[in-house]
Image (cartoon, rainbow, N blue to C red):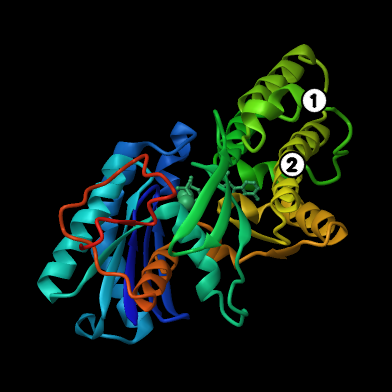
Amino acid sequence: PLVLGIETSCDETGIGIVRGRTLLSNTIASSMDEHARYGGVVPEVAARAHLDALQPTIEQAIAEAGIRLQDLDAVAVTSGPGLSGALMVGVGAAKALAVSLEKPLYAVNHLVGHIAADIVTPDSEPLEYPTIALLVSGGHTSLLHVREITTDVEMLGETIDDAAGEAFDKVARILGLPYPGGPQIDRAAVGGDPNAIRFPRGLSRASDMAAHRWDFSFSGLKTSVARWVEQHEGEDLPVADVAASFREAVVDVLVTKALDACEERGVPRLLLGGGVIANKRLREVALERAAARGVTVRIPPLSLCTDNGAMIAALASQLISSGRRPSTLDFGADSTLPVTEIQVAERP
Ligand code: ATP
Ligand code: MG
Ligand code: FE
């Protein structure tokens, strides 16, 4: 099926068009620059930016895909989780588009969309199930057990405080580096010793395992970096060592938990997604340790890892192929939509 996907859960206005497993276009407008001076995404600013960007982004996407809106078999949209106001803009637009075109509408889960990014990754073999998925971005850090993408996705764990990307952003700020922090920390860490400072690995102690086996925590790490910097005030701050050591702590805990989940669940496959996957050290450590433990790692191209509309269209395309009915038009934006709700408001 030919599907147009609309994604507005955070600061990217993403419009993607797919035909089955084939990616036709993936157009993204980001309001990231507008959030820079606040050091993080400002919900109200993001929502307004979506309103401005939607129309031109849709036009660009259909031009790039070489299709007409009338040719579509369905429209898809992110219903949640995400920022309420931002989601509402996409949901409103998707409903208007579907109604005016008289096309079915599929309201889908953003996190499951991140997994669906793999489906439209060019030149890749179909994703095998079950798979463990690690999604790391500015808004979430989630470990999922995907038995089948349209019917059975289980949340193993998630962050109990800051998301991994958020930790990068906050630590960058502590080090006096601009937003977004991820690429800045990466740059600052060049030549640094990842073992110079032993920063804490959140929720990794034996005593954490009962309640938080698969959960993450990064706010203690952030505080620990802030304290270290404070204690060494007045000295020449070894920024490269601090950045490399901080990054190592994040990467270590992410990769360890993801691969432990693969082992414990007997699933030799790991899918990575989210904007933090841009981190070279994370990819490097994940690939290295996975190989040692007999786990195959899949990483979609970065344009499909960060928030985008193609993954939303891909998920809907998969739902359609497995015979699922469209959504009724009475759904809204659900900022805390659980991952088990892969599709929202499926027609009875
Ligand atoms: P959502 O959480 O809804 O998926 P988001 O906009 O918060 O969306 P992304 O756009 O996927 O997340 O990713 C942005 C985050 O990724 C930022 O926190 C940024 O610091 C982080 N990031 C980007 N590049 C890197 C990198 N090289 N290393 C670490 N983190 C990075
Ligand atoms: Mg973003
Ligand atoms: Fe996302």
Quarter residue 195 falls in: top right
- Label 2 within 8 A of ligand 1 by Cβ: no
User: Which residue: 77% across, 12% down?
Assistant: 231
The image shows residue 60 at horizontal and vertical percentages of 32, 74
The residue beneath circle 2 is: 188
Could you tell me which quadrant the N terminus lies in? bottom left
For mark 1, does the 10 Å Cα neighbourhood hold few (<14), some (14 to 19), or many (20 or more) residues?
few
User: Which residue: 56% across, 79% down?
Assistant: 122
Q: In the depicted view, which residue is nearer to us: 167 or 102?
A: 102
- Looking at the image, do the residues carrying marks 2 and 1 touch, with CB atoms under 8 Å apart? no
Could you tell me which quadrant the C terminus lies in? bottom left
User: Which residue: 21% across, 72% down?
Assistant: 104
The image shows residue 177 at horizontal and vertical percentages of 63, 35
Query: Disc 2 residue type?
Result: Ala
Quarter residue 216 falls in: top right
Tell me: 290 left or right of 111: right
Vertical placement of residue 280 versus 234, above or below:
below
The residue beneath circle 1 is: 237
Vertical placement of residue 180 versus 63, above or below:
above
Tell me: 270 left or right of 190: left
